[in-house]
Image (cartoon, rainbow, N blue to C red):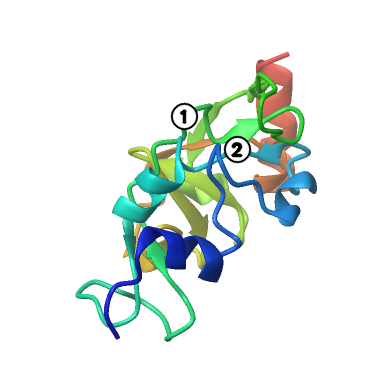
Amino acid sequence: MARPTLDQARRLFINRFTAEHVPAWAAKPCDNGNFYAPQFASDAEWYANTKFYGELGHIGVRHECYTSGQTWPFGQWLAQPYRKGVAPVAAQLKRYSCRFDQLRVGAAFSKNGNACVKRSTRTAKMTEFDRTFYYAQGEQVIITDLSGLTADHAEFLAASHA
């Protein structure tokens, strides 16, 4: 299959989220109470950073595309749903530093700017690249939601940042 043109890609991939195209799912809040922000400033920027079926580097099946290199022109989270033509309100997320062993399995965190999810007591998956890595128990990571901590660590961290 040949790479679709930008116009074809716009018609085929209606779930892309750019400042020019807002999918229906973007109006719903996320688990953290915030809203997703557009991944790219324009459809052309999204297209330039997207692999389609048959292209080298495409991950997935025929009807899916694979996007990387998001520029997040308004940040990754918004306090309100994004609407074209309305200045977005960035979410003010608190950031906490903690050790990997203080996270519960399934908790979201970031390391070196990469979004990750803890999968076991020793491993985590990078969400953008779908790769699993080993982590040292005492390795420092960043969280934005205290619910990702084990109960005893959440109480301590909340008290120390109050």
Give the residue at x 73% y 55%: 25
Q: Give residue 40's mark.
A: none
Residue sitting at the far top: 162
Describe residue 9's horizontal placement relative to residue 148 as left or right: left
Relative image position of residue 28 (x, y in whole percent): 80, 48
Is residue 29 at all visible to an observer of this figure? no
Q: Amino acid at mark 1?
A: Pro
Give the residue at x 73% y 13%: 162
Give the residue at x 39% y 66%: 66
Report which quarter residue 126 is drawn in.
bottom left
Q: Eyeballing the image, is 150 above or below 117? A: above
- Say how many tags the image has: 2
Is residue 118 at all visible to an observer of this figure? yes
Q: Secondary structure at mark 1?
A: loop
Front-most of residues 83 and 69: 83
The residue that label 2 is drawn on is 37
Q: CA distance from mark 1 to mark 2?
A: 8 Å
Q: Eyeballing the image, is 154 above or below 1? A: above
Q: Amino acid at mark 2?
A: Ala
Give the residue at x 42% y 70%: 65
Relative image position of residue 102 (x, y in whole percent): 56, 46
Describe residue 58's horizontal placement relative to residue 150 as left or right: left
Front-most of residues 65 and 84: 84
Q: Secondary structure at mark 2?
A: loop
Relative image position of residue 155 (x, y in whole percent): 75, 32
The residue that label 1 is drawn on is 73
Give the class, few, some or many, for how many residues have Cα within 10 Å of label 2's Cα (few <14, many ≥20): many
Relative image position of residue 70 (x, y in whole percent): 39, 44
First-in-chain label (1 vs 2): 2
Report which quarter residue 154 is drawn in.
top right
1 and 2 marks in contact (CB < 8 Å): yes
